[in-house]
Image: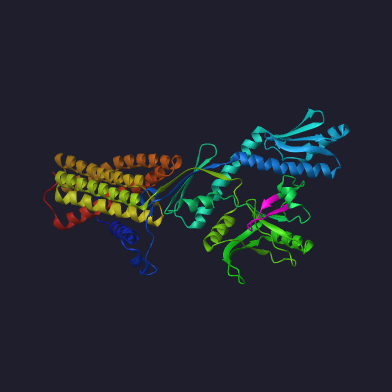
Amino acid sequence: MLTLSRWKVILVVVSVVFGVLFALPNFLPQSVRDSLPGFIPKNTLNLGLDLQGGSYLLLEVDTEALRAERLANMAEDVRTTLRGEDIAFSELAVADGGINLRINDAGQVSPALTLLRNNIGNALVGVMGGRDVNISNRGNQRLRIEFVPEAFSAEAAKAVEQSIEIIRRRIDELGTREPTIVRQGVNRVVVAAPGESDPERLKAILGRTAKLTFHMVDETADVAAAMAGRVPPGRLLLPSDDGGMLVVERRSLITGEMLTDAQSGFNQQTGQAVVNFRFNSTGARRFGQVTTQNVGKRFAIVLDDRIMSAPNINEPITGGSGQISGSFTPQTANDLAVVLRAGALPTRLNVEEQRTVGAELGADAIVAGQISAVGSFVLVLAFMILAYGFLFGGVAIVSLLVNGLLIVAAMSLTQATLTLPGIAGLILTLAVAVDANVLIYERIRDEIRAGRTIISAMDAGFGRAMLTILDANITNLGAALIMFGLGAGPVKGFAWTLSIGVFTSVFTAVLITQVLLAVWLKTARPKSLPIV
C-alpha cells in the first residue's frame, strides 16, 4: 500500500493546484481579483449574516386578510350569479367570517340555494362532489355562505408556501447571496439577508403585496357620495397618487399575473422615472380588447389598492406593453419593477421582528473565528511535533494545511456560505483529520515494536488503520447529512463545512501522507523510524 505510484503523485499535485487556484481569490483584494485573467477562478466564500452583517426579518403571513379578500371576491360572485338569473336579493354583506344575504322572494330561496351551490366556490380536494364553501339556509329567507374549515386551512398553508417562493424571488432580484428563508411555525417566515444593510428597504420590498390590477374608471359615479359611504354596488373607492379619489369597477380587467416583464426606465417626454411592463399573450390580447372597446374612457392602474395613474385611452393599445407613471424616484421605480417581476404575494406580510447585524459585529466575529482557528492549529502543531517528531509531525501538519486549503477551495467553488458555526465545523474537521494521522502513526509504532521491518510496518500502519478511519468519517458524514437535511440557517452551514471536510480529511490524511512518507523512504533509505 505504501508505494510511490505515478497516479498518486499526479492526484496529489492536481489537488494541490486545484486548492491553490480556487482558494487564492479569498486572500486577494477586489482590485487584484478584477485584474486576473479570465481563466482563473474569481469566486470567493460567501459570508453569512453573522460574519458580514445584514438584515433579519420575522414575517407573518396575514391569513385573516386573505380570508377577508376571498370573502369580498366571493360576495361579488354571489351578486353576479344571482343577478344573472334575475333572483332579487338584499342585505348582501361580509360578516363574522362569512357572507350573509336575504332572498327577497320566499319562493326563490330554494332555486337560489341550488344556483349558489353549483356556482360558488371550488371543488374540495379529496372529497367527491364536495366544495370548499358551505351554503346554508338560516330561515326567514336568509342564506349564509362560509368556508369549509379544512379548505381554508389548506388555502392558508398554500399562501404561506407561495409567499416563501415569492420572497425568495424578490431577494434573488436584489442580488443578495445565499439568503436564508425558512418557515417558522404555521404562518411565519424567517428571512436573513447577508450584506443587505438596510432593513427598511428590505421590509418595503418583501412586505409589499404588489398586486397589480387594471380597472375601468366609473365617470358617472358621485365621488363625494362614495366618500360619504355610499359606494355603488360593484364599485370601489380608491385613493389616487395625485391626492384625489376615484370610483372604479370592482372587477379587474387584467391582473399582474399576466405580466412577463417589468423594468424601470424614464419617460422620454418628462424625464420622470417610470416602470415599463409587458404582458403575456393572454394579457396582451385582453388589454387590446379592453382598450379597443373603451376608447375615450379612463382606466386605472391599481397597485395594492392605490391608483398609480388613470390615463385616458386615446387609441387601442395592441402591442402588449404599457407604462406605470407616478411620483417615482429611480430607486423606487427599480424596487417596484423588482416586486412586479417576482410576482404578487397572495396576501400581505406583517413584520413581527426585525434586526440588523452591523458589519462591525461581523468583522469582530471573523477576527474571533480567525483567532480560534489559528490557536487550534498552533496547539495541534505543538502536539504533533512533540508526539511524533519533526518528520512525521511535520508531514501531518502539511497534510492538515492542504486539507484546509481544499475545504476553502471547495466552498468557494460551490459558493457555499461560511457562517460562524461553519468556522466551528472547519476547526472540528481539522481536529478529526489529525485523528486519522494519529491512528496511522500509532499503528506503525505497534508494528515496529512487534518486530516488523520499516516498510512492512508502515504499509501495515496505513492498511490496518484505513478501516477505522473510514468508519469514523462515515459516521461523521451521516451526522452532517442529517443536520443538513433537518437543520436550518447556521446549522446547515456547520453541516456543509463538516461534509466537505470529511472527504478532504480522508484524502489528505491518507493519500498525501502516504506520498510524502514514500518520497522520504525512497530518498533517505532510513535504518530506523524516528517515530518510535
- What residue sits 50% from the left and 55% below the top? 172
Q: Is residue 463 visible?
A: no
Query: Residue 468 occupies which quadrant of the picture?
Result: top left
Which one is nearer the viewer's eye here, 264 or 460? 264
Which one is nearer the viewer's eye here, 274 or 169? 274
- What residue sits 30% from the left and 43% below the top? 428
- Way the structure is coloured: rainbow
Q: Is residue 519 visible?
A: yes
Examine the rendered structure and indicate whether residue 519 appears above or below residue 81.
below
Q: Is residue 406 magenta?
A: no
Give the farthest residue toward the top.
139
Q: Quadrant of the C terminus?
A: top left
* Image location (x, y in percent) of residue 276: 61, 64
Relative side of 126 to 169, left or right: right
Query: Residue 93 occupies which quadrant of the picture?
Result: top right
Which one is nearer the viewer's eye here, 5 or 78? 78
* Image location (x, y in percent) of residue 295: 77, 64
Relative side of 126 to 526, left or right: right
Q: Is residue 240 magenta?
A: yes
* Image location (x, y in percent) of residue 29: 32, 63
* Image location (x, y in percent) of residue 505: 30, 48
Which one is nearer the viewer's eye here, 103 or 15? 103
Give the farthest residue toward the bottom.
269
- What residue sits 23% from the left and 53% below the top? 398
Relative side of 12 to 114, left or right: left
Give the farthest residue toward the right.
107
Range covered by the magenta-colored residues: 237-248
